[in-house]
Amino acid sequence: MQDQAELLREMMKKNEGSQEIREEKKTRIITVASGKGGVGKTNISINLALAYARMGKKVIVLDADLGLANVNVVLGVIPKYNLYHVIRKQKTMKEVILDTNYGIQIVAGASGFSRVANLSDEERSHFISELSELSSADIIIIDTSAGVSQNVLSFVEAADEVLIVTTPEPTAITDAYGIIKIISTEIGNLDMGMKLIVNRAGNVAEAKKVAHKVISIAAQFLNLKVDYLGFVYDDPSVPAAVRKQLPFMISNPRGQASACIQHMVNRLEKVEYKEGRGVGHFIRRLMGRRE
Ligand SMILES: Nc1ncnc2c1ncn2[C@@H]1O[C@H](COP(=O)(O)OP(=O)(O)O)[C@@H](O)[C@H]1O
Ligand SMILES: [Mg+2]
């Protein structure tokens, strides 16, 4: 029996030249992951998205953390439908992409892409052409659940960039190293950039110290280059914003946390700019991984 993923890859190849998968601009796909839960992935994802939107970019946040479906809580919106409805042909991608008041759009993910493998060729090609609707975005930010499920690995593997979030807590640092290690061993051809964010730091020096720890261990034991993207201060305006169901970039735009987010986006765009590989590539990678 032919491998399902292989089948899908073949089908993608056939589709490559077709109208649905062709794209003008190259969407940049950024996956946000962490070893430990509650370290700030969702807040960072949303506020990075807002900072990008302020630069005039079209941004979609894909909430891949389905168990906790946090993105909508922090934004105060409730998506009725998710990618599963698209897979089942109950909704189109357009209907599942939700506008927010903040100039960004959100999409609720589906729990795992394993179901995709069980679809008929016709259903699969329908889903893929619907997914390519995402290529209207300049940036797609994928907020994942903590740890390394196959689902998270799929999004990591398919991304142009992976942002690993940790806090200065020893357990978060250990888990950050843990996920970096699993990513580096599970995903052979690691061609995406891995970048570290230290959230909830007391000051610049603490953040640097934490980053140095993780980065030097990854270099020493995994022979892996991880860049330090930046840090976010431990800032009471973050939980205050969450309680108000507002992104902190909105409720406290001049706060310390907001300044840190802006700094990281500037860095991603100016210093480390590289063109994304686009949604076509993203989808092929996403579908290529077996669950
Ligand atoms: N920079 C920060 N300063 C203070 N508290 C923060 C900060 N970032 C996150 N938090 C707190 O941690 C909680 C969890 O953050 P969240 O983004 O939901 O984490 P994750 O998505 O990784 O589970 C937030 O509700 C907030 O109370
Ligand atoms: Mg979250």
Image: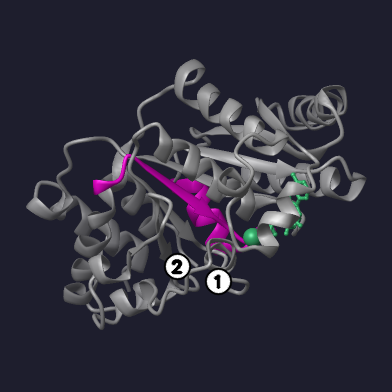
Query: For residue 227: magenta?
Result: no
86 and 192: which is toward the camera = 86
Identify the residue at horizontal 64%, vertical 30% (top origin): 259
Is 111 left or right of 183, judged from the image as shown? left
Query: For residue 157: magenta?
Result: yes
> Residues in magenta?
136-158
Return the residue at label 1.
Answer: 66
**What's the amino acid at mark 2?**
Gly
Position in image of residue 143 (x %, y %)? 55, 55
Position in image of residue 167 (x %, y %)? 81, 43
Badge 1 element = loop
Q: Which mark is residue 83?
A: none
Quarter of the image where the N terminus is located:
bottom left
Identify the residue at horizontal 19%, vertical 61% (top origin): 129
Does residue 155 appear in the picture of this structure? Answer: yes
52 and 113: which is toward the camera = 52
**What's the amino acid at mark 1?**
Leu
Query: Which of marks 1 and 2 precedes in the sequence?
Result: 1
Return the residue at label 2.
Answer: 109
Q: Note whether 259 is above or below 19 in the view shown.
A: above
Is 112 left or right of 89, judged from the image as shown? right
Identify the residue at horizontal 63%, vertical 37% (top origin): 258
- Residue count near mark 2 (Cα–Cα under 10 Å), binned few <14, some 14–19, many ≥20: many
Position in image of residue 57 (x %, y %)? 34, 37
Q: Quadrant of residue 249?
A: top right
Number of marks in picture: 2
Circles 2 and 1 in contact, beta carbons < 8 Å: yes
Q: Note whether 23 is above or below 121 in the view shown.
A: above
